[in-house]
Image (tube, rainbow, N blue to C red):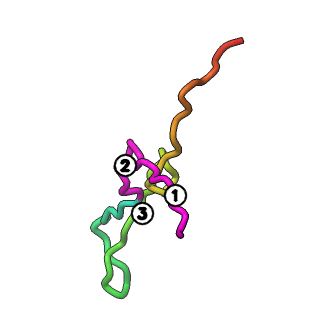
Amino acid sequence: MPARTPARPACRDCGGFSTVAITTGARHHDGSRALLRIVCHGCNGTGLTLPTPAFSRTGR
């Protein structure tokens, strides 16, 4: 029987769409568009987040 892994929640910053491509309006010599690829800083491009701990200790 296959083992099931729990589903990890999507990143709250990007909603699971971790990489976007934005056109600059410029074109390369071959005619293709120049794109900027931006990666989400919250999840580092994975689209998923780690579950937050139920208890976190702060202070002394």
Q: Which residue is mark 2?
A: 14
Q: Which residues are magenta?
A: 1-18
Q: Residue 15, position in %: x, y?
A: 34, 49
Please name whichever residue, 52 or 17, is drawn nearer the observer in this view of the structure.
52
Secondary structure mostly seen in magenta is loop
Please name whichever residue, 18 or 22, is drawn nearer the observer in this view of the structure.
18
Please tell me whether residue 47 is drawn above or below residue 59 in the rendered image: below
When asked about the image quadrant of residue 17, the answer is bottom left
Q: Residue at x 37, y 79 (%)?
A: 28
Q: Residue 18, position in %: x, y?
A: 41, 56
Amino acid of disc 3:
Arg
Alpha-carbon span between mark 1 and mark 3: 30 Å
- Examine the structure image and report whether residue 7 is included in the region drawn in magenta: yes
Disc nearest the viewer among 3 and 2:
2
Q: Which residue is mark 3?
A: 37
Helix, strand or loop at disc 2? loop
Q: Which badge, 1 or 2, is on the more N-terminal residue?
A: 1
Q: Residue 1, position in %: x, y?
A: 53, 70
Helix, strand or loop at disc 1? loop
Amino acid of disc 2:
Cys
For label 3, the crowd category at 10 Å Cα-Cα, with few meaning under 14, some 14 to 19 and many 20 or more, is few
